[in-house]
Each structure stands twice: as structure tokens, then as C-alpha cells.
Amino acid sequence: MIRPYTALPTVDVDGKRLRTIGILKTVEDAVAAAGDLVRLRFADSADLVVLGGARQVRYWQQNDDRFGKDVMTLPSSAAIGRLLLGDALTFAQEGDEWRRGRKLTVPQVNPKCAPLQRSVTESAAWLADQFATSAPVALRDLTLEWAVRAVMPPFIGHTCTLREGQRFATETHRAFYALIQKAATVDRETLLNDPLLLNYRQRLHTLVEASLIGIADEPDTMLAQFYHALDVAHYPERKASLVNLVMGNLSGSIDNPATSLQWCLIHLARHPDVQARIAQETHALPPDGIGLQKCPVTLAAVKEALRLTPVSSLVERTVLQDIEIEGYGIPAGTAILFSPWLVQHDARIWPEPMQYNIDRFLQGPIPPYHYFPFGTGKRHCVGMSLTLHHLVITLARLSLSCRFQLAPGTRPVDLRPEFGLNLAPRGDVSLTVTPLAIPVSTGSF
């Protein structure tokens, strides 16, 4: 017998407490109190159903067609992203709009693409140069520039400066956070006319217009490829989609990788033994250079960082048709939350889950419903391979030139994860660096 939706274990969410502790902690507390399958009931907005365990993730993976991404219903983060970046791939509506964006994007984020390979390698070398110092190295701005340097030239070319790219990333973060705060109390029409949103959208168009000047000289950029694929010259009404698709991809390829690198560096700073293992592996690389398959230790270090501190800690979905899960009926239209944060910290799956232990990823395959920091299903992050490659090549490159640790005086509160646009360190963490006396040759990079 199927139990009704109203019989689901339910936690009433206090609005004041939610604003104080945030949605991630609210979800974590609800699951701790009521179990992996729990309904969050809000006084002034629709319910959220948390499917917080590996069993529920497995159900999702086996029934992906029953879940979609609702990008229109406020105050979800997907709906805010839709306001900011329109039909960008991450916020595209299900169906043809999403399929078009994915078809255009996938070839352009392949880490084997020559312009990306070159840019990623150069950004890793640039970061190593920044670490050639005895002064403390603050991570937040440094990792942001590292990410901008890697993807801005192959995505939109060299017409706009790196500083403009950093400003774009910062403005996206600020606008997203401001709008999601406002969305709790105002309607969609009010948000659409918010000066902050209007100014942000104008800024996007200005950046793209400036970059379009250079597409004849840089025909291999994502911008140039999308411009021709959409035939914007003959269909100028498609320019808005061009802006959304390119700048949405740029935003996603800057913010999350930059934050992921912060976490990788923080975890490694606390584990000099792992730094040494990465260096040993990198020294033994063959002459033809680096690759994920050739660097299992470095890749394991990255994956373990993304297990402990998954940048995308909550995944929003909507039930597209009535479903039954674990004896409960959940009607179509119900908002669902899955959580890499919860599953990847589950002691039933991961022994000593709060310990950083890279050997977890060196002992055979991990079930996909136990580990999904890039999402899962058809709408998983298409930039996953690029991000992993960029992180691995960067950590390998650093291992040849330095060792690093947390700067003296680092406060535990600065290392605490804080969930905003993504899961980032609460403070701007600094490292102290010890350059190697004789840096190893980087010819294979």
C-alpha cells in the first residue's frame, strides 16, 4: 500500500532559523532528525522533499527521466540563475533548449581541445610562479585569477582583459546572492526590473559585444563557434542566447573550479604526506606529459577533496510525474533536493567520513550513487573532465616547485565551509610556501 505524501516524515522549518543557519545546515539537521527521506515544510513557500541518502540517489540515477530541473519557480537557485543567465546550459529548460546548449557546449569544454590545453597549462604555470614566494599566499583572489586565465581566452578571446573576467565572476556571485535574498519576499516581475539585475545583464552584453570584435582573428573561441552555429549574423534575435550560453559557460568554468582549487590546496596544506606522494608521482611522469590516467594519486587527492567539500552540495530537481519511493507517493511538481554533502559524509558508506584519506579512491571503483560532486544523470556538469584535468595538472605542477602549509594564525572558522552560491571556505585562507631549492624541470607540462 502506498502511503500518501502527507504521511512523509516532516520537519517544519522556522524562517528565522533558516536565515541564520542557511539551507544546507537546515537540510542536514532535518535528515539527522527524521531520516534520509524527509519533507521540509515552510510557512511561506512550497515544500521541499529531501532525498538525502545513497538509496534515493540510486533511485534517481535509475529513473532520471522522472526528474527535471525547474528553472522558473522562485525562490530556487535555478530560477535565480535563469534570471541572470537566461537559457545558459545550466539553467536551460528541459527539452530542445537544453539539448541545443549541451550539443554546442560539449566539444568546447573537451580538455583535449588544443586552445584549452594550452590555456590550462599556462594557468598552472602562472600559479606556480605566484607560489614562488616566502610571503603568505591568500587563496581567494589567486584561485579566481587562475580559473579566469584558464578559460577566458579559449571561451571569449583576448579582446577583454583578465581583470574584466575577474570582475564578471565577482559580479555574478554578488548578483546571485543578492537576488536569492530578495526572492524570498518579492515576485518575479519585481526581480526582473531590479536595477542590479538590469545592470548585470547590460554588463554581459557589453562584454560579449566587445569580444565579438575579435572573432575573425580568433575563430576557434567558444564565442566564435557559437556565433556561427547560431547564425547570429542572419538571426540577430539569437544574440541574447549567444550571450547567455557563452557567459553561462564562462561563469560555471570560473567560480566552481576556483573554489574547488581552494579546497584542494587547503586539504593538501594539512597533509604534507599527500603533497609528497603527488610529487613522487609527478617526478615519474613519462616524457609525453600529464593525464588523468597517468596521475592516479593526484586525481585521488582531488576527488577526496571534492568528497569532503563538494562545491555543489545541493542538487535541485522537480518530480515530472507521480512517483513512489520507499512506500511513499510523491506527486508531480514536488521540489526535490539531493545532497552530495550528505551522501559523501555518510558513515554508513565512508569509514571515518570527516578524515581526508585519498586511498579511498585508489582501491577500486566507487558506486556513482555514493559519490557525485558534479551531479548525475543527463544534467551532470559537462565540464567535469575539464575541471578534473585542470586541478590535477595544477597540483602536479605545484608539487615540482614548492611545498605549502596553512599560514600561522589561520582560524578554524576561516576553514569552515559556508554555503552561498557554492560551498566555499568561510574566510580568505592563506598559505605559507616553501619553494624547492632546485625546482624540477617542467618540460612535460
Image (spheres, rainbow, N blue to C red):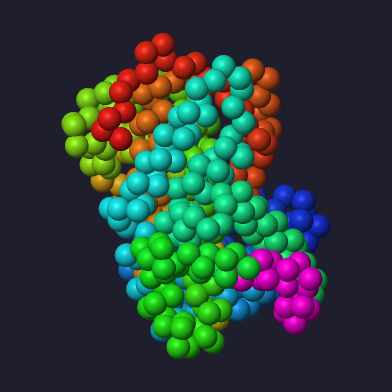
Q: Position of residue 355 (x, y in %)?
A: 47, 31
Residue at the location (45% across, 88% down)?
234
Which residues lie in the magenta part?
188-205
Corner quadrant of residue 81: bottom right
Residue found farthest to the front: 217
Q: Is residue 174 above or below residue 2?
A: above
Location of the N terminus by quadrant is bottom left
369 left or right of 197? left
Q: Is residue 333 above or below residue 177?
A: below
Residue at the location (42% across, 81% down)?
230
Instruction: Give the main secondary structure, helix, strand or loop, of the magenta stretch.
Output: helix
Of the pair 425 and 156, the residue shown nearer to us = 156
Q: Position of residue 301 (x, y in %)?
A: 38, 34
Q: Position of residue 294 (x, y in %)?
A: 23, 37
Residue at the location (41% across, 28% down)?
398
Q: Is residue 254 above or below residue 280?
A: below
Q: Position of residue 422 (x, y in %)?
A: 58, 52
Of the pair 185 and 122, the residue shown nearer to us = 122
361 left or right of 387? left
Residue at the location (40% across, 62% down)?
218
Does the segment drawn in magenta span residue 310? no
Observer able to see residue 313: no
Residue found farthest to the top: 437
